[in-house]
Image (tube, rainbow, N blue to C red):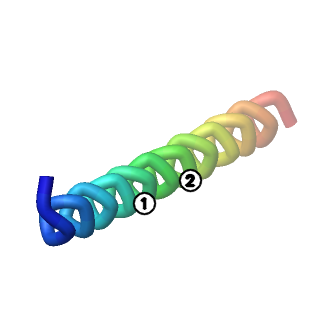
């Protein structure tokens, strides 16, 4: 295991974490939109 490989794996883990965060933000945004649509339909 070289230092370069370690740096690459940490960069990969960082990009994976960013992707997961973006997906979570996207899902929560969709949930908020769906709740808002349901709320406006009820009104």
| Horizontal and vertical percent position of residue 19 | 37, 54
Q: Earlier in the sequence, mark 2 or mark 1?
A: 1
Residue contact at pointers 2 and 1, CB within 8 angstroms: no
**The quadrant where residue 40 appears:** top right
Q: Nearer the viewer, residue 40 or 32?
A: 32
Please tell me whether mark 2 sits on a helix, a strand or a loop: helix
In the drawing, what numbered circle is on residue 8? none
Q: Nearer the viewer, mark 2 or mark 1?
A: 1
Residue in view at x 13 percent, y 62 percent: 2
- How many numbered tags mark residues here? 2
| Horizontal and vertical percent position of residue 1 | 13, 52
**The quadrant where residue 8 appears:** bottom left
Q: Nearer the viewer, residue 39 or 18?
A: 18
Mark 2–mark 1 distance (CA, rounded to whole Å):
11 Å
Q: Residues within 10 Å of mark 1 (few under 14, many from 20)?
A: few
Q: Is residue 2 above or below residue 17?
A: below
Q: Is residue 31 above or below residue 11?
A: above
| Horizontal and vertical percent position of residue 14 | 38, 61
| Horizontal and vertical percent position of residue 30 | 55, 44
Q: Nearer the viewer, residue 28 or 14?
A: 14
Image position of 36 (left or right of 16): right
Please tell me whether mark 1 sits on a helix, a strand or a loop: helix
Quarter of the C terminus within the rendering = top right
Residue in view at x 43 percent, y 53 percent: 17
Image position of 18 (left or right of 27): left
Q: Is residue 23 above or below residue 2?
A: above
Q: Residues within 10 Å of mark 2 (few under 14, many from 20)?
A: few
Q: Residue furthest right?
A: 43
In the drawing, what numbered circle is on residue 25? 2
Residue in view at x 54 percent, y 45 percent: 24
Image position of 6 (left or right of 20): left
To which residue does mark 1 refer? 18
């Amino acid at each position: 295991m070289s230092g370069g490989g370690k740096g690459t794996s940490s960069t990969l883990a960082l990009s994976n974490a960013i992707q997961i965060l973006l997906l979570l933000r996207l899902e929560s945004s969709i949930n908020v939109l769906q709740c808002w649509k349901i709320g406006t339909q009820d009104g």
